[in-house]
Amino acid sequence: MSNPSSNSSSITEIVNKGLKKRYRSEFMFRLYGITSILFAAAFLIVFFSSIIDKGYSAFTQGELNISIYLDPEIIDPDNTLDEEEIRYANYDKLVFDSLKNFFPSVSSRKERKELKALVSNGTSLRIQSLVLDDMSLIGKTLDLSVKLDSDIDMFLKGNVDITLDESQRRISDNQVKWTNELKTKGLISQKFNSTLFSAGDSREPEQAGVLGALVGSFFMLLITFIVAFPLGVAAAIYLEEFAPKNKFTDFVEVNINNLAAVPSIIYGLLGLAVFINFFGMPRSAPLVGGLVLALMTFPVIIIASRAALQSVPPSITDAALGVGASKIQTVFDHVFPLALPGMLTGSIIGMARALGESAPLLMIGMVAFVVDIPSTPLDASAALPVQVYLWADAPERGFVERTSAAILVLLFFLLVMNSTAIWLRNKFEIKW
Amino acid sequence: MSFSFFLLVIIILGLGSYYFGKSKALALKQNDVVHSLPKYYGYYALVWFATPALIIVSLWLIFSEGIVTNQVISTLPDNIKTLPTNELTLILNDIKNKAAGNLVAGESFIGFELAAETYNSYSKIAENIIIYSSIVLGLISFIFAYISISGKLRARNRIESIVSKILLVSASIAIFATAGILLSVLFEAIRFFQIISFDDFIFGLTWSPQMAIRDDQVGSSGLFGAIPLFLGTGLISLISLTVAVPVGLMTAIYLSEYAPSRVRAVTKPMLEVLSGIPTVVYGFFAAITLAPFIRDFGETLGMNIASESALGVGLVMGIMIIPLVSSLSDDVISAVPQAMREGSYGLGATKSETIKRVIIPAALPGIVGGILLAASRAIGETMIVVMAAGLSARLSINPLDAVTTVTVQIVTLLVGDQEFDSPKTLAAFALGLTLFVVTLILNFYALRIVRKYREQYE
């Protein structure tokens, strides 16, 4: 016959024996949880610091203070003041001459080439347009701050290893020497890189900007919103308020859920096959991009709008129906206005995702190199994320920092859109 | 008349018909019983005006190009008319460019200028016909509607039935979109399989899609064996899931079972940021920061790691998927009834024992569904692999090698110059079809599992 008290004490002993191990495993388990959160946090920190570290320098650009004598002998030797004559004058020589003033000893062909390459090759175009705007400048001396070539700029920002052999870097010993001389004379300064926000794409890093891509992305989002928001909201209203419970409704729901999870590149294939090849719409145009993104955003908007419609309490519907409103009047005059902020919030978040999407845009030819800023949704254009992709592929060192800068611009707009959504939600959301 | 002016006229006329319809109803109301609110009569008139106008305009947008082109072709000289289709298309493109006022490389035949002018004048005629006929028809139909407005007309019911039809059509767009995706990919894929046999594609071990410049060139046929791509996609997805599943699951468990509200308040937005970062940015990070780091790290250990290794790509992709896994698991873990936890605590189990022995088994179907969704996301992910993974197809399951994926190949085949009939371009659609079918099956089952699981505890 067993003794109950000794039996229970032995159970306590067994439990106590195991306790330490169990507590340890409890502790370890909790530690795993904390570790995984810290892992994600650490990644975010590394990620953002790496992008900012690479990108912040792109917001400034090295410029050289230079005086350029607008020699009438070169610009307009016959004093014709003829625009065509002046347009085709040798402005490169003007720039070269004024650079030569700093370093009169330059003579060999190689040295001349290196000297010319100190400043951006867009300089002569800039002088040309200045002269064409105001012909009275001819014969005067212009004090200008001109952009340095991107390679020199990279050297100044410390991104060129000058201990390497001359042949292994993009800037020559002479250029290093000259740049340092100009710098000690105080002629070189880092200025805010306004080109980054006012120019389209370019092969030269110092002349490249994100404006073209920004405008392209804006047109696309506009079309996405115009197409996807009304359709998405209408579909959500139908499914939430009117749809009978039958096979067709189930089928629609299955389709929406699947569309939300279809890889984005497939939407690109659809755009290529249907919009471009079948309907003959222009390649690289924000119109097509917007339509493709609209199809992608459509299920997202439906899902968000349905959630917003569900959150409107049934008492509202009952009250409206009770005073004799028809079903449609109830929905459009009462339920819809109350659900609208929630729908907008969800749609803005969906649009933010569309803004960051690039895979489908590659399919419909938005990877073209476009210098001009698009003025209508039918013009060829880039998009912000695609610009990131294009610049990330460019071999010049100057594009690495510009890629990161474009990423920062992209992230900034995503932040703005998401904060707008959160602000909307907080301001207009009604707690029932 | 320019298109925007035409649009303006249509809008003004539309507003006008609304106004007239409404005011007639208001006037009737003075001395008669009117069935609906006056605004519904306005809408009624508006619908009658706009429908014929819109139908004509959309017919114009769809057909005018083809009709005008056919008219122009019929005026071309006979020797041009009988050219093969693709040459004729080129010439027509030149004519259209010329007609639009662009510079054209060369005028290929006598009468080229004339053709461009003909094109312009026919387009003009077509445009005028459409503009005036749509306005006139719209007005006629408006007048009929206006006359028919009376107190007995049930305008609200008519409008409401139209509105509910519009809603139904909007919802059906989801079906059209799926069908559109399937058909567009399927048609091109079928053309591909007419050239390359299905078996060679699915079971072939070599992928080298370059086509011959000359017919007698060595290896001119191009090899389209997709096994290396499937293997590469699988490898990278597997690596990413090995990162994402433990981390995402543990995050979700910690957040829903352990974390004090302050930790939740910080961690949730952090995960949202992680999921909000565009994939092209992840790709840039993988290619510029992580891949060189892994390569250099491997060098210090004396290993030879490709700078486009599957490991680096998989790692970054895994991090991208963490929020997806974590939010889906969070949902299913919170759906486990509280009673099950309390039962376990009551038997003396510690928290972690409860989680491991009760909650996870109970939530397992939902978690598996979430993992399947994550896998489908990993398989279809494009930008990270395009930017950071390899281009050449290699039959390898070594995570330190550079491998390529289905999506990378679709992009490389379709970006840049393409001729639309070559197997090379069509192969992209065959790959797209495979991708679509695989992700469709994964999503379908994942969503079914998740839904069944939810119903179980509701």
Image (spheres, coloured by chain):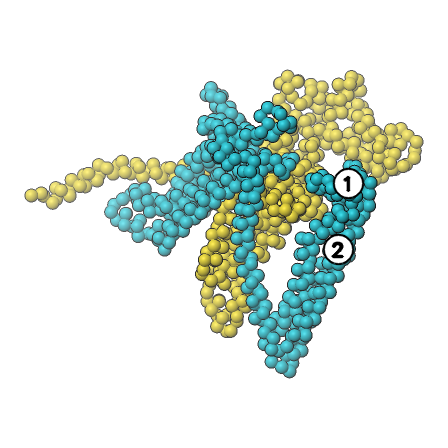
Chain colours: A yellow, B cyan
- State how many labels appear: 2
Query: Which chain does the residue under circle 1 lie in?
Result: B
Q: Is residue B115 left or right of residue A27?
A: right
- Measured Cα–Cα span from mark 1 to mark 2: 27 Å
Q: Which label's residue is closer to the chain start, 1 or 2?
A: 1
Between residue B352 and residue B400, name the one nearer to us: B400
Q: Residue at x 73, y 48 (%)?
A: B69
Same chain assignment for discs 1 and 2: yes
Image mark for residue B79 = 1
Q: Is residue A409 visible?
A: no
Residue at the left extreme, as displayed: A1
Identify the element where label 2 is drawn.
helix
Indicate the amino acid at tag 1.
Asn
Q: Which residue shows up at 68% across the image and 69% down it?
A: B142
- In the image, taking residue A296 as reference, residue A366 lies left or right, namely right
Residue B126 image label = 2
Q: Is residue A342 above or below residue B312?
A: below
Position in image of residue B244 (x %, y %): 44, 38
Name the one closer to the observer, A248 or A305. Answer: A248
Q: Give how far across and how far down residue A78 sits, in percent.
A: 93, 31
Depicted B296 relative to depicted A317: above or below: above
How busy is the neighbourhood of tag 1: few (under 14 within 10 Å), some, or many (20 plus)? few
Q: Quadrant of residue A21?
A: top left
Q: Where is the N terminus of chain B found, in terms of image quarters?
A: bottom right
Residue B319 is situated, as x and y percent measured from the top left of the image, at: 47, 37
- For badge 2, the amino acid type reads Ala
Q: Nearer the viewer, mark 1 or mark 2?
A: 1
Q: Relative to residue B157, is residue B300 depicted above or below?
A: above
Does residue B167 sit above or below B423 in this rendering? below
Q: Residue at x 52, y 51 (%)?
A: A299
Chain containing mark 2 = B
Residue in view at x 51 percent, y 48 percent: A259
